[in-house]
Image (spheres, rainbow, N blue to C red):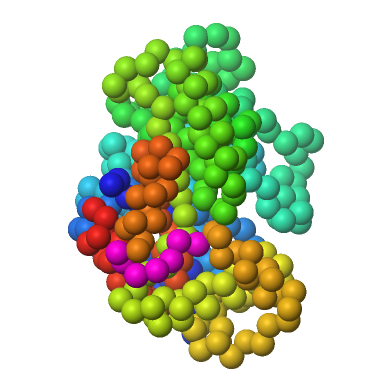
Amino acid sequence: MKLSILDYVPIFEDRNAHDAFNHSITLAQTAEQLGYTRYWVAEHHNVFSVASSAPEIVMMMLLEQTQTIKIGSGGVMLPHYSAYKVAEQFRIMEARHPNRVDMGLGRSPSFKQVNEALNEFKSTKPNLDNQIEDLLHYFSNKYEAPHRFMSIKATPEIDTSPQMFILGLSERSAELAAQKGLPFVIAFMGQSQTKINRLIEYYRQRYKQLNDISKSNEPYVIMSTFVVTANTLNKVDDLLDALHLWLLRINYLNQPKSYPSINTAQKRKYSTSERNKIEKNKSRVISGLPKDIHLKLTYLLNTYQVDEIMIMPHVYGEQARLELIQLVANNSL
């Protein structure tokens, strides 16, 4: 099984952003030693409980502290930014660490005021499809058709390019990935099996229709999912308590200032409405003892015919996160 990690860089209760970055460096180094394929960091704005608001900067921290594992963004929300500037940021990382830089790209909207702040003074919001085409031009510095910025190049000039990925949950994103001949990353969020299978199959069919297929150029699908595991079911339940409080507060309540501790989560009193929302969120999380996690990840792999699973070890506590990725690796790598 091919496994990778998506890290939100959580800021735990009684910790700060400095602690979060240091721990993510340790986690990435451990993931490298365990044989994980890639280690990505998310992009979240105005979310106080995670530190990954600028994934490209966190990526460079991780690249400098690891040796072989691929480091990437999961992902850069490209419509907020200049494709030219993003191309140069990733070219700098690629120049320093050739063939280790992944560029996951998405169109996910943020909160209304965050959108306004990131796009202030823009008369129109950029089109992601056009921006992906721009990035492909900037990375190759070749233009098969006239381009509005043909006279400039993204620098520094280098011999390799970051690997691009398209993130999404819609047919529109799957179509974009297929059109550009890029891997597709889909999040497992408790959607119906039929919906996920239809989307992945659509991507694979369109990819084959639009691209010359060879062993080095085939459709490629990564599925990401929250994973919670530990050596005992009691510990799993404790970690789930904290995760579900975090999910509840992120999705339905005011933004928490930090990722809540297990103690805080277990003292919390929930309304009937909140308990219903927690119950709904349970389908988003793969949980259980390590042997159960292996069976559940294998099920995802086989059921949806994906090429790689990207786990999100978004649980409370540095040691718990380290143990989680160790247990998953021991049973599934």
x%, y% of residue 127?
67, 30
Residue furthest top as drawn: 145
Identify whether 300 is placed above or below 157.
Answer: below
Looking at the rendering, the stretch of residues picked out in magenta corresponds to 285-291
Q: Is residue 26 visible?
A: no
Please tell me which residue lies in front, 144 or 105: 105
Identify whether 107 is placed above or below 26.
Answer: above
Q: Residue at x 43, y 42 (%)?
A: 303
Identify whether 30 is placed above or below 140.
Answer: below
Q: Residue at x 56, y 34 (%)?
A: 199
x%, y% of residue 28?
31, 59
Q: Residue at x 39, y 49 (%)?
A: 299
Please tell me which residue lies in front, 304 or 209: 304
Residue 318 placement, left or right of 134: left
x%, y% of residue 190?
57, 54
Residue 296 placement, left or right of 136: left
Q: Residue at x 49, y 15 (%)?
A: 210
Question: Is residue 174 a member of the stretch shown in magenta?
Answer: no
In this figure, what is the number of numbered marks?
0
Q: Quadrant of residue 315?
A: bottom left
Identify whether 178 is placed above or below 69.
Answer: above
Residue 274 placement, left or right of 23: right
Q: Is residue 228 visible?
A: yes
x%, y% of residue 212?
40, 13
Please tell me which residue lies in front, 311 or 271: 271
